[in-house]
Amino acid sequence: MTVTIDPHSGFCFGVVHAIDVAERELQKTHTLYCLGDIVHNNMEVNRLKEKGLVIISHEDLESLHDCKVMIRAHGEPPETYQVALRNHIELVDASCPIVLNLQNEVRHGYEEVSALNGQVVIYGKEGHAEVNGLKGQTNGEAVIISDENDLHKIDFSRPVRFYAQTTKSVEGFNRIVRLIGDRMKESRPGSAPDFRWSDSICRQVSNRSNQLKDFARNFDAVVFVSGKKSSNGMILYEVCRGINPRTYLVSDRSELRKAWFSGIETVGVCGATSTPMWLMEEVATGIRSI
């Protein structure tokens, strides 16, 4: 049986940057606090915990003083920076530059549309760390929609400024843009809708969909490696499974099942933007041992 690892899978730039920052800081000190999981992959989080990384919650942050706290690639809302200033906490900001740019866009869009009695709409996963950071730029007023079933949350008679979580699909974003535009025209026939949008999706992430489609069709079976909490991972797993029905999701090699590979000659191993290459290599080794 031949096992091949997808060379395009693995950490995106933002995650690589955050982990590099964490490892540099951990070389200077035995303990570094991180606000939330540095990456949505338990295996990588545990590796860094062994080096001294301590994962904390926003509630924990309120009780910390005079220490260093890292902000991960997802970014944070303004309230986090205010707490840090109040508690004399030094922030090690590893926010992805693409996310920071989007936060600025959302903040400016909110200031503009508020003067017009309009609304900011964000296409993303409610409660996701990145979305929380974006919503924070709007004083918590942004409307969050995950798909077309949430469109009822929008007042189509008012101006709209539309943005997307950076890891959402381009196809989904474009579909929602069309639907909002159509609904706004229906709500005010005869007048041009005040609707502006910004395609804020990270192309390093979105391009992986097409790369994975090409990869998945070349093998008898595919093993997709991802933490279950990774939104990007679940999206890309479904992309692979749509091309190759014999696609299996695992967090690590312990979840591999011998029955998956009965009669199989070629297996592809791939992963999310939050999946480290070393973990895909371990899974590939596990498959070969079967």
Image (cartoon, rainbow, N blue to C red):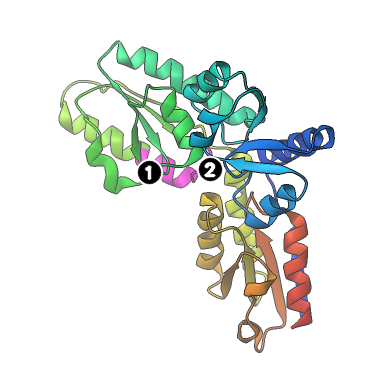
**Mark carried by residue 269:** none
Q: Where residue 264 sits: x, y (%)?
A: 68, 84
Q: Which residue is mark 2?
A: 167
221 or 217, which lies in front? Answer: 221
Q: As displayed, is residue 98 above or below residue 112?
A: below
Mark with earlier residue (1, 2): 2
How far across and down, in percent of the image, does residue 179 sit?
Answer: 30, 40
Residue drawn at x 16%, y 26% as measured from the top left: 188
Query: Can residue 9 be seen here?
Result: no
State yes or no: discs 1 and 2 in contact (Cβ < 8 Å): no
Rendered position, 21 above or below 104: below
The residue shown at (59%, 53%) is 210
Question: In the image, which disc is placed on residue 175?
Answer: 1
Q: Does the magenta segment cover residue 66?
A: no
Amino acid tagged 1: Arg
Secondary element type, mark 1:
helix
Q: Which residue appears at 64% of the width and 61% of the height?
A: 214
Front in this rendered view, residue 133 or 206: 133
**Amino acid on which disc 2 is placed:** Thr
Q: Which residues fall within the magenta stretch?
A: 165-176
Inspect the magenta stretch and tell me whether residue 169 lies in it: yes
- In depth, the one of 53 and 16 nearer the eye is 53
